[in-house]
């Protein structure tokens, strides 16, 4: 399996990738967002030093109890971060030989006007689209700029809660969704090798739906595409552990990494990069045959 990026490619199987989260906003659910570009860049630099293979920068919170920022404001926030992106890894050494270097830059956004502006800035390698790809516009933009596209499973428009969505068969619905969206993306001119899949933990899903996704995640291997699992501090972890404070859910996050990795996930989106990197490195070593080299 190959992930095609604008100027390089990632070959799987290999050690799963760790994606760090940088929020250039002031309403992140984990309380780690900032509108200070220097502080955001230092967060990214720290994550690169801790072993992040990918840095996922977002300029708008996905929280449904907050109004959406304007497209112009979202673009302004991205521009302030991206203009200094190369500073993130200057003078920093990769943590080990398996770390993707320099880190892959991912932009977490979904509105086509913002996607177009961000890709024109020329530094983003992955568009992390939480909009569930309702049409082919973002796929066409990624095809034009030779960027990869991460498609997340959900329903409806982002920033709107879907707390009453019921899934009689969540995995069956997810398989049909990805079949449709992969076809939509490839018909828009995006190579299948440039697509990643995200099961959308906590998005239009309730506690039992999310647990089912974790249990049956291996079913997504049928698509032969890298699967990213956004495991970090999710609501379902808080529900299982009785922890309303998202910052107390890092141990549960590691448990979800172990479960998803066993079922074939290739990438994990996390706040605590150091803990995730250690977990993934050990789990990968345990899964490898003797004398099998990292990655």
Image (spheres, rainbow, N blue to C red):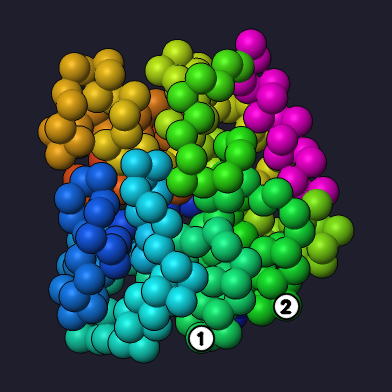
Q: Position of residue 61 (x, y in %)?
A: 35, 54
Name which residue lies at 57% across and 62% down.
111
Establish if 196 lies above or below 81. Answer: above
Q: Position of residue 289 (x, y in %)?
A: 44, 37
Say whether residue 242 is left or right of residue 277.
Answer: left
Q: Position of residue 107 (x, y in %)?
A: 46, 66
SS state under label 1: loop
Is the C-beta separation of discs 1 and 2 under 8 Å? no
> Is residue 182 found inside the magenta-colored segment of the image?
yes
The tag on residue 256 is none
- Choose top left, top right, bottom left or bottom right for residue 140: bottom right
Asked if residue 265 shows in the view, the reply is no
Say whether residue 236 is left or right of residue 292.
Answer: left
Establish if 281 lies above or below 119. Answer: above
- Choose top left, top right, bottom left or bottom right for residue 70: bottom left
Name which residue lies at 45% across and 14% down.
208
Q: How many marks?
A: 2
Earlier residue among tags 1 and 2: 1
Q: Position of residue 48 (x, y in %)?
A: 26, 68
The tag on residue 144 is 2
Q: Nearer the viewer, residue 142 or 100?
A: 142
First to last magenta residue range: 168-183
């Amino acid at each position: 399996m190959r992930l095609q990026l604008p100027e390089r490619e990632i070959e799987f199987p290999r050690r799963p990738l760790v994606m760090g989260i940088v929020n250039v906003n002031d309403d992140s659910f984990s309380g780690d967002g900032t509108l200070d570009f220097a502080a955001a860049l230092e967060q990214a630099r720290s994550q690169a030093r801790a072993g992040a293979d990918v840095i996922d920068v977002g300029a708008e919170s996905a929280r449904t109890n907050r109004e959406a920022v304007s497209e112009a404001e979202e673009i302004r926030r991205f521009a302030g971060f991206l203009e200094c992106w190369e500073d993130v890894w200057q003078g920093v050494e990769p943590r080990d030989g398996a770390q993707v270097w320099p880190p892959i830059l991912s932009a977490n956004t979904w509105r086509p006007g913002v996607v177009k502006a961000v890709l024109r800035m020329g530094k983003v390698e992955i568009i992390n689209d939480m909009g569930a790809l309702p049409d082919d516009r973002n796929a066409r933009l990624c095809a034009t700029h030779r960027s990869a596209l991460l498609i997340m499973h959900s329903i409806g428009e982002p920033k709107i809660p879907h707390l009453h969505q019921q899934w009689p068969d969540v995995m069956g619905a997810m398989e049909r969704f990805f079949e449709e969206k992969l076809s939509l993306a490839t018909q828009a001119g995006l190579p299948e090798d440039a697509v990643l899949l995200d099961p959308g933990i906590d998005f239009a899903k309730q506690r039992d739906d999310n647990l089912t996704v974790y249990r049956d995640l291996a079913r997504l291997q049928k698509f032969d595409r890298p699967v990213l699992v956004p495991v970090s501090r999710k609501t379902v972890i808080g529900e299982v552990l009785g922890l309303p404070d998202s910052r107390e859910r890092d141990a549960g996050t590691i448990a979800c990494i172990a479960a998803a990795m066993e079922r074939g996930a290739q990438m994990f989106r996390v706040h605590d990069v150091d803990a995730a990197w250690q977990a993934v490195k050990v789990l990968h070593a345990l899964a490898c045959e003797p004398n099998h080299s990292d990655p």
